[in-house]
Image (spheres, coloured by chain):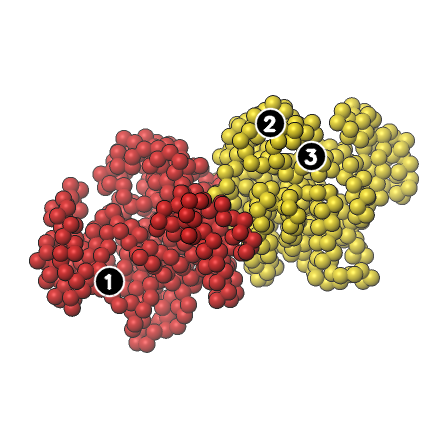
Chain colours: A red, B yellow
Amino acid sequence: MIGGGQLARMMIPPAVALGLELRVLAETEGSSAGLAATAVGDYRDAATVLAFARGVDVVTFDHEHVPQEVLAELVAAGVAVHPGPEALAVARDKILMRRRLSELGAPIPAWAVVTDAGELAAFLAEQGGRAVVKTPRGGYDGKGVRVVTRPEEVADWFAEAGASAEGADGSPAGLLAEAFVPFRRELAQQVARRPSGQVVAWPLVETVQRDGVCAEVTAPAPGAEASAPGSTGDLAARAEALATRIAEGLGVTGALAVELFETAEGELLVNELAMRPHNSGHWSIDGAVTSQFEQHLRAVADLPLGDPAPTAAWSVMVNVLGGPSGQTMLDRYPAAMAAQPAAKLHSYDKSSRPGRKVGHVTVTGDDLESVRAQARAAAAFFQG
Amino acid sequence: MIGGGQLARMMIPPAVALGLELRVLAETEGSSAGLAATAVGDYRDAATVLAFARGVDVVTFDHEHVPQEVLAELVAAGVAVHPGPEALAVARDKILMRRRLSELGAPIPAWAVVTDAGELAAFLAEQGGRAVVKTPRGGYDGKGVRVVTRPEEVADWFAEAGASAEGADGSPAGLLAEAFVPFRRELAQQVARRPSGQVVAWPLVETVQRDGVCAEVTAPAPGAEASAPGSTGDLAARAEALATRIAEGLGVTGALAVELFETAEGELLVNELAMRPHNSGHWSIDGAVTSQFEQHLRAVADLPLGDPAPTAAWSVMVNVLGGPSGQTMLDRYPAAMAAQPAAKLHSYDKSSRPGRKVGHVTVTGDDLESVRAQARAAAAFFQG
C-alpha cells in the first residue's frame, strides 16, 4: 500500500486476521500506519516506488496522488496495480472525473472547465450567480473547494501555475466549476470490485459534512428503502446500480466510494469519487460482516468478496476532528470508556490539530436515536 | 506481551484500533505475532524478560509458562504485571489450582495429588476404576492429560524428574488425579477483571473438544437460560457468578476463562482455568461488541471495560486444526471465500502440522443451524 495514513493503518487488522502480508510505503517515519511500514519515501519518485513494489503481489493506495507516470512505470515493470492507472487518473483529477462520468451518463451537477475569470463569470451567470469551484487536484476534506458568487474569490487559484496550462501528464488545464446543488442531504454508496469483475455493495449511507469534512455517517441511510416520487426503484437500489455502473464503467478495482447529493426531488447526483476505502465506510469495521478495509484487500488481491451485509440495524460513525487539545485520545479513554462501554474507539495515533481527523467512534444497535446519541457522546470526550 | 503465539497475534488488531502500542517478546523469529515482536528471546530468562519490560506500562502474557521467579523479578523491578504472579501461579500449576479452587468453594471434580503408582491405585479404587491424570504443568491442547484405569498408564510421568519432588519455586510434587466426569457437555465462561475491580462477563458458551483440543464453540451456549431442576438460577447466571467469584478470589487481572463441565444433573464443575484470552472466546472477535482481545488489553491497562454483549443471536467458531496438507490457508482462500462469503477467516500464519491450531473461522447470524453449517463448511476448506 502506497501511503501511510489512517486508511493504511486500518488495513492492518484485516491483513492480520487473514494472514495477508501488508507492506506500506509511508511518507514519513512515525506514520499512522507505521506498524506495517516497510519503507519510507516519496511516492512521487518512481525509483522509490519501484523499489518498494519489488516482491509484492499487488500495489494499492491510501490516496490518489501517485503521479500517472509513476503508475505507468509500475505497470511497465509488470507490477499488478489496483486500482489501475486509468481508473486512478479519474479519481485524481476532478475534471477528468466529470468528463468520464458524463460519458457514462451518470447524473452529476452541471459543470464547466474555467480557465479565467471571464469563463467563470459566464458560468456564474448561467447558474444564477452562485457556483462551486474546485481545484482539479490535491483537494481533500474541504480543501480546494469554494462556493463563490464572484470570480475574484478564486483569483489566487487562477494565478497559480497550472490553472491555465495542461499538465505534463495530459491532465486538463483550468478549474472545475459546478452548479451549486441545494441538496436535501448527502449520501455515499460504496462498492468493491475485483479485477475479475465481481462487485458487491454495502448499504447506502447518509453522511453529514461540517466545513467540508465528513463528521458523521449513518448506515444505512434512513429511509433509503423508500421510493422517491417519479423515480424508478428505491433510493438504495438506484444508488447501488449507479455505483456499480461507475465501478464497471471506469474499471475500478478495490473499493469505490461514490459521494452523492440527494436533491429535494429525490434525485441522486454524483458529487465525488474515491477509489479506496473512504471515511463514509469506516462504520463497516464494526457494523458490517466485511469491512471496507478487508474488502479492499480481498478485491485488490482478486479474492472472492465478503458479505457486505450490516451486522446491526444501525451503525453511526462520528469522526474525532481535531482531537483533544494538548492531549492524545488515550488520555481521554478512562472517562470515555467508562461512560460509553459500547462505543468502538478508533485512534489513528496522530497528534491533535484543529480540523485533523485523528480518530473515529462507531456505535451499533437496534435504535437509531440511542445509537447516534452514544456515538456522539463518545466522540465528544475526545474533542475540546 | 510475553509470548508470540496466536493469542498475541490477535491482540494486534484491537491494539491498532485503540492506538495502544503493543510490544511482544516472541520465542522465535517469524512467530505468529511477529508483526508486533520487538524482541525475541527466552521467557524463562529473567534478564531477557526484564530488558524487554523496560519502558512498557504493563506486562501481560499469551501463556502461563513464565517461571515464578522471573515474575517475581519483574515485580521487584517495579513493572506492572497483569495477571499478577500470585494469580498466574494458580493458572500454571494444576495442583495449586485445585487447592485454591477448593478453598474458594468452587465446585470441581474429586481430586488428589498422587506421587506414585500406589497412591494412584488407591485413587482409582475410590473412583470406580477410572480417573483422569494430568501433569501439573506445561500441558495444553490435550497434552499432559490421560484417562487411565491402571497406574502403569502414567508410569513414564511418575518416572520423570519432579513428579515426586517439590519444585524449586514451591510448586507441589506429584501428579494430579481427578475423577472422570461423565459430563453432558463442556462449557466455558469468560470474564475480564481490571486491577481496580471491575468485572464483566461474556455469554456462557458451549465448547466441543476433539482429542483434547477445542474444535468448535457456540455462543451463547444453547439453552443456557434454562434453569436446571433443583438449581437456583439459570445456567448462564450460575456460570457468570462462579467465574466472577473465581476471578475475584484469585485476584485475576485481564481475561479469565473458566472451562466447565455440565453434568447430566445440570451442575457445573470447573475443569480448567486460563488467565488470558482463550480459544473458547475467539468467537468474540466477530460476535461481540468487545472481543476478548480488546478486553484483555483494556483490563491489563486498567481501562474501563467494554460491553461484552453479543452482536448476533448466534456465533459459531470452528478451529482449523492441522491446516491444509502441504499448503497454507491462503492457498484455499479462493474456494473458501467464494463458497462462504459470510465466514470470518482467521489465519495464524503458521505452517500446517497435524493437530496444530493454524486458524479459525467464525460465522454469526440469527439461525443457529445455518450459522453452524456455514462455519463448519468454511473451516473444512482448510483441512485435509
Q: Kindly identify the amino acid type of the residue bearing the numbered disc 2.
A: Val
Q: Kindly identify the amino acid type of the residue bearing the numbered disc 1.
A: Ile
- Tell me where residue B41 appears, x and y as whole percent: 57, 25
Q: How far apart are marks 1 and 2 (CA)?
A: 61 Å
Q: What is the secondary structure assignment of the residue under circle 1?
A: loop
Q: What is the secondary structure assignment of the residue under circle 3?
A: helix
Residue A241 as seen in the image, left or right of residue A160: right
Q: Kindly identify the amino acid type of the residue bearing the numbered disc 3.
A: Pro
Q: Is residue B372 above or below residue A68?
A: below
- Residue A222 in view in this figure: yes
Evaluate whether label 1 is on the same chain as label 2: no
> Residue A55's mark?
none
Q: Which of marks 1 and 2 is in front?
A: 2
Check the picture and name the quadrant holding the N terminus of chain B: top right
Rendering quarter of residue A237: bottom left
Q: How far apart are marks 1 and 3 (CA)?
A: 65 Å
Chain under disc 1: A
- Tell me where residue A104 appears, x and y as whole percent: 24, 59
Chain under disc 2: B
- Tell me where residue B286 appears, x and y as whole percent: 54, 51
Mark 1 sits on what residue?
A108
Mark 3 sits on what residue?
B85
